Amino acid sequence: MNTNESLDAEFVKDGVYEQKGYLNQDFRYFHLCDQKKQEYSYHYHEFDKLLLFLKGKSDYLIEGKKYELKPFDFVLVNQYDIHKPVVDSSDEYDRIIIYINHDFLASFSGGDNDDNKYSLLDCFNNARALKTNVVRFPAGISASLYDKLINIEKNIASEDKEYAGELITRLNMISFLIDFNKACKETKYSFYPEAQYNSKIIEIIEYINDNLDKNLSIDYLADNFFMSKYHMMRIFRSETGYSIHQYVTEKRILKARDLIISGVPATTAALESGFHDYSSFTRAYKNQLGSLPSETVKK
C-alpha cells in the first residue's frame, strides 16, 4: 500500500508506459497529485482498478469509450479492460487510485437468496453489464466515501505505529468497498452512461469478446459488420489504440491464461480461446505474458 509514490501506479517506468501491471497483494492505495505533461499509452491490468477523480482536466478512454470526468467521479476499470487517461497538464491532476486483486474481491460474497446476495465485485460486474465505467453519486454520498478513503490514507501512514495497523487498514478498506457497492446498488442513476464512442466499434469490441473461440479474421468481421476492412481497421485503431489483430490476440491470451489457472489443460485452453496452432499459441503467450503456458501457476 502506498499513498505518495513519485510515479503513478499506472506503471510509468523510465518514461515508457508499460502495457501490463501486476499486483502481488490484495490491494494498493495511491493518492497522487501532479502537474506534468505525460502521454499515456493504452494498456490493461490483471487486477480491477477504482479511481476517484478529484481535480484537473482529464478524459478516460476505456474499451473504445471516452468519458469526460468531473470532480468526484468514480471510474471503474475491470480486469483486462484496455484503457488510458488523457490529462490536460495545464491544471493539477489529483486522484485516488486503488488497485484491487480480483480474487480478493471475489472472496467476499454471500447471501442466502436473491434479495440479500452480495459480492464486492458487484460494482465492477454492474459496470460491465450496464456498459459504462463512470459512477457519479449525489454530493453527500461522494463526500462520505471520500472521507472513508482519506481515513484509509491516514491508516496507511500510521500502520507502523499502531497496534495491528495493517489489519486496521484492511478492515477499513473492506468497509469502504462494502459502502461503495451499497451506494452503487441503492443510488438511482449512479452509473453514468454518457460517453463518446463510435457505436460500430463498440459492437465489434463486444462481438470479439463474446466470440474469442470463433473466426475473427479481418475479412469476416468486415463482412459481418458491413464495413470496408481498411476503414474498419483504421477506425478501430483510432478508437482503441490497438490494431484488430493485436486486440484479438491479447484478449485470447488473457482468456487462455484464466482457463489454465482454473485447471484447464493448456492445449484445451488454446482451442477454447481461438488458437488452432499450439506452437503459435505458445509463442504469442510468451511474447505477451513473458512465460510459457506450462509455467502458469494453477490455483
Image: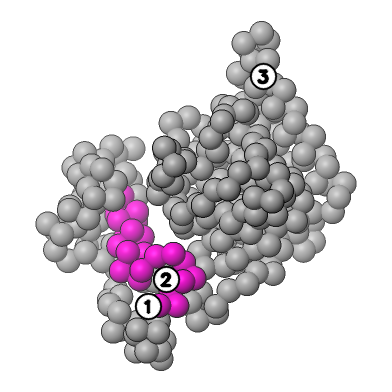
Q: Which residue is mark 1?
A: 233
Cα distance between the residues tagged 2 and 3: 42 Å
In this rendering, would 155 be left or right of 29?
A: right
The segment highlighted magenta reads 234-257
Q: Quadrant of the C terminus?
A: top left
Q: Which residue is mark 3?
A: 157
Closer to us: mark 3 or mark 1?
1
Q: Which residue is mark 2?
A: 237
Classify 10 Å Cα crowding around label 3: few (below 14), some (14-19), many (20 and above): some
**What residue is drawn where x is 63% and y is 28%?**
3
Can residue 112 be seen by looking at this rendering?
A: no
> Which structural element holds mark 1?
helix
Residue type (three-letter) at the residue carrying disc 2? Arg
Residue type (three-letter) at the residue carrying disc 1? Met
In this rendering, would 230 be left or right of 79?
A: left
- Disc 1 + disc 2, Cβ < 8 Å: yes
Percent x, y for residue 160?
62, 11
Reply above or below: 25 against 39: above
> Which structural element holds mark 2?
helix
Reply above or below: 268 against 38: below
Cα distance between the residues tagged 3 and 1: 48 Å
| Magenta stretch contains residue 253 | yes
The foreground one among 19 and 56 is 56
Percent x, y for residue 60?
60, 58
**What residue is drawn where x is 51% and y is 32%?**
26
In this rendering, would 126 be left or right of 42?
A: right
**What residue is drawn where x is 29% and y is 46%?**
289
